[in-house]
Image: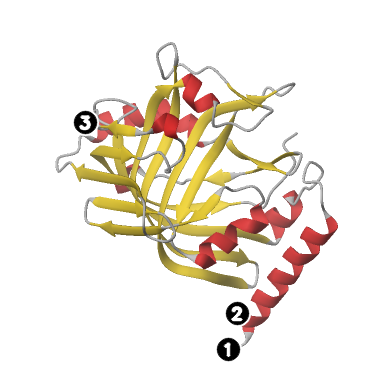
């Protein structure tokens, strides 16, 4: 039995290598059945989240050719919702019917993504991940089978209520995030405000791959009982995502005050293999 994880790992990487060699155009690649019946990814993410209204022009500039912003009712005219996450991922694994294959026990991560995007001739709304920064090589490799996830290796230090991100060589600070979790929680307000953004977390993730796009289901699995309203301050430098987002962001709103306020969560996500976006 002690060789089972090793055998599973070999089989997994052989299937990934076969898929990579067989499918050069990800427009036609679809692992829907494989993901549903054989393998998917899971982990626990813990940290601070915030959906922020940012200049639509700046966010549109981060989209690859073919994707456009789709209007929402979350932001005022000229603004559009984006997601930020600063925290840790725990127990990253590929899950199969006969067991799980661990990739990384715990690592630091920061995510920046754009809600409500679409592309021509498609009515569906998607979530586009502008970037993911991680400090684990195993976690970085895990993204490759999913095709198009924009992951970058970085040096990241996470402390209580604080995360600092540096370039891979540690010479350039990319971002600094500080947050405060509020003590008293009004659960009714938390439920009410989160419900306004919850539908956007249900959208499929879309990623650029080759000449087209690949999509996959991602279940965040937020639970109100494991969420806390927080206040977040971010200092983003030019190299974090883009110079268009450089600056200090601190509105001091929490999720009980506004659906675009910050919240702290521990949630067990599940991620499918890529599918066609049609």
Mark 3 residue crowding within 10 angstroms, few (<14) / some (14–19) / many (20+): some
Q: Mark 3 — residue? A: 252
Q: Position of residue 62 (x, y in %)?
A: 54, 32
Residue depicted at x 65% and y 75%:
9
Q: Is residue 131 left or right of residue 177?
A: right
Q: Secondary structure at mark 1?
A: loop
What mark, if any, has residue 2 been given in the picture? 1
Where residue 116 sits, quadrant-wise, is: top right
Q: Position of residue 115 (x, y in %)?
A: 51, 30
Which of the two labelled residues, at mark 2 and mark 3, occupies the earlier sequence position?
2
Query: Compared with residue 221, is residue 229 higher up or lower down, i.e. above or below?
Result: above
Q: Secondary structure at mark 2?
A: helix
Residue toward you, 223 or 68: 68
Name the outermost residue toward the right: 22
Where residue 264 sits, quadrant-wise, is: top left
- What scheme was used to colour the molecule? secondary structure
Q: Circles 1 and 2: CB distance less than 8 Å?
A: yes
Q: Position of residue 204 (x, y in %)?
A: 60, 38
Q: Quadrant of the N terminus?
A: bottom right
Name the outermost residue toward the front: 171
Q: Is residue 28 left or right of residue 255?
A: right
Gap between marks 3 and 1, in whole Å? 50 Å
Residue depicted at x 25% and y 36%:
187
Residue toward you, 118 or 245: 245
Q: Mark 2 — residue? A: 5
């Amino acid at each position: 039995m002690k060789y089972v994880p090793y055998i599973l790992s070999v089989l997994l990487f052989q299937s990934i290598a076969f898929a990579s060699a067989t499918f050069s155009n990800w427009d036609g690649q679809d692992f829907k059945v494989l993901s549903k019946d054989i393998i998917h990814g899971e982990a626990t993410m813990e940290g601070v989240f915030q959906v922020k209204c940012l200049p639509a022009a700046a966010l549109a500039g981060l989209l690859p050719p073919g994707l456009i912003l789709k209007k929402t009712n979350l932001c005022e005219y000229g603004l559009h919702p984006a997601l930020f996450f600063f925290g840790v991922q725990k127990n990253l694994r590929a899950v199969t019917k006969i067991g799980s294959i661990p990739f990384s026990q715990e690592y630091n991560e920061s995510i920046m993504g754009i809600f409500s995007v679409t592309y021509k001739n498609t009515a569906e709304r998607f979530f586009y991940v502008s970037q993911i920064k991680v400090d684990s090589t195993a976690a970085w490799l895990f993204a490759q089978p999913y095709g198009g996830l924009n992951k970058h290796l970085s040096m990241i230090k996470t402390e209580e209520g604080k995360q600092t991100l540096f370039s891979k060589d540690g010479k350039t600070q990319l971002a600094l995030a500080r947050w405060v979790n509020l003590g008293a929680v009004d659960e009714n307000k938390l439920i009410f405000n989160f419900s306004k953004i919850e539908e956007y977390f249900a959208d499929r993730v879309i990623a650029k791959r080759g000449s087209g796009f690949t999509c996959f289901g991602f279940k965040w699995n937020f639970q109100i009982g494991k969420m806390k309203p927080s206040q977040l301050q971010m200092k983003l430098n030019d190299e974090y995502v883009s110079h268009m987002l450089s600056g200090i962001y601190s509105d001091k709103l929490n999720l009980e005050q506004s659906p675009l306020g910050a919240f702290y969560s521990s949630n067990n996500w599940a991620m499918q293999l890529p599918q066609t976006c049609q």
